[in-house]
Amino acid sequence: MTTATPKRGGIFYGWVIVAAGLMVWTLEPGIYTSFGVFFKPISADLGWSRTMVSGAFTMASLMLAVFSPISGSLADRYGPRNLVMTSGLLVGVAYALLSTVQSLWQFYAFYLLVGISMGIAFAPITSTVMRWFAENRGRALGITSVGTGLGGMVFPPLANYLIGAWGWRDAYLFFGILLGVMVMASGSVLRRSPEEMGLLPYGVERYGPASGGAAPQRVATGYSLRQALGTGAFWRVFFSAMAFVFSFALVHAHLVPHATDRGLTPATAALVMAVIGASNAAGRLGLGTLSDKFGRKRMLFAALLTVSLSMLWLIWAQDEWAFFLFAAVFGLAYGGAVVSFIGIQGDLFGLVAVGAILGATQTGTNTGGASGPLLAGYIFDVTQSYSLVFVVAAVMPFIMSWLILTLRRPTRR
């Protein structure tokens, strides 16, 4: 029988869910965003152009686009535990195999497996956290997704150190072992919903028993995926997320090569990536909480506009301080936007099919993530400069920021 008791053993189990999600989001995206640190060592060792190396990031992003909606629907039906544990096994194997790469097709195939494994983890985690929290949802999502910032703060400098000490192959092997063990352990504690454990979502008990309060009704209603796809609001969020991640992905793939082209050392460039991670974490945690108070639409507008201006700044950045300033501002905007992108979909469409809706939106984000790095690599190989692609990465989120500002909640006919 479902009760309104919020705790077991002195702690609400939803916070265990948040901690497990935090671990997965720290490890998988954190190591994935270290791609730029591996970029030049792999290119130099194997003689590949920047377009060729960028193609691996594109392969991973395409698989994220394909598998995110599938995993979201599966999580709605079967729960997140087995999906996330499978993700841990696959991503560990993929990074271990990257240590053996000798040819381009192997590089692409193993990063394709990285994308598949990440694609089956993220939508289940976010939809599960949303189900466990009726109140403080923005805070819970912020804490969970702050892992991406923490991982971005830790793993690029660690990758740079390991590459210098062991070489890029052994660095990949180390990351594979770490991911396999820790992600599988984190996935084992996930539970689909509080009702499975005789609990209610966090905050529901304030509204009364499960049979009557307003909050339980809010948790139980919403749009199906098909209904959401028929609204203009969904497509505004979809294309805004695509434009946003276009900029984010090319930064994570090409900022280190760009910074070293401008004269920064590899260690300093990795530290710039760490600052992006730190400010990303601050944005997810701080701005995620503020979005509960001031509204996610306003947060998204401000974040998209800030990303646009940051990309223009990157064109002229030459000195170390300019790159560090970019990292602080860009990371803060990125972190706040991610939490708002996730939370606003629950606000707009409810929670009945939130996993499937989040997965469908991630198809857009990962399409942007696939095209950004590849276009940047191609433009650099042709022009020997990233300036043109940085302009594109500034214009796209600028346009989408105004679409978000005029976003309205859909109404049923």
Image (cartoon, grey):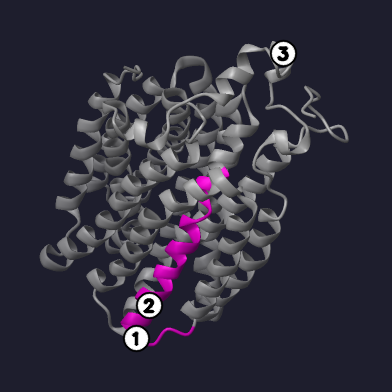
Name the residue nearer the viewer: 261 or 128: 128
The stretch of residues the image draws in magenta is 100-125
Say which of marks 1 and 3 sits in front. 3
In the rendered structure, which amino acid carries the disc numbered 1? Ser
> Image height check: is 217 above or below 46?
above
- Residue 413 vs residue 184, the one in the foreground: 413
User: Which quadrant of the figure has residue 324?
Assistant: top left
Q: CA distance from mark 3 to mark 2?
A: 53 Å
Q: Secondary structure at mark 3?
A: helix
Q: Residue furthest bottom?
A: 102
Q: Is residue 112 magenta?
A: yes
What distance separates the C-alpha of mark 1 from that of mark 3? 59 Å
Q: At 33% from the left edge and 59% from the top edge, which residue is drawn?
A: 62
Q: Residue at x 56, y 77 (%)?
A: 173
Q: Secondary structure at mark 2?
A: helix
Residue 6 seen from this side: yes
Question: In percent of the image, x 34 and y 25: which residue is there?
Answer: 302
Kindly identify the amino acid type of the residue bearing the numbered disc 3.
Answer: Arg
User: Residue 206 shows which numbered tag?
Assistant: 3
Residue highlighted by disc 1: 103
Task: Say if mark 1 contacts mark 2, CB within 8 Å.
Answer: yes
Say which residue appears at 28% left-offset and 48% top-offset: 246
Q: Who is closer to the viewer here, 263 or 312?
A: 312
Residue 144: x percent and y percent? 59, 40
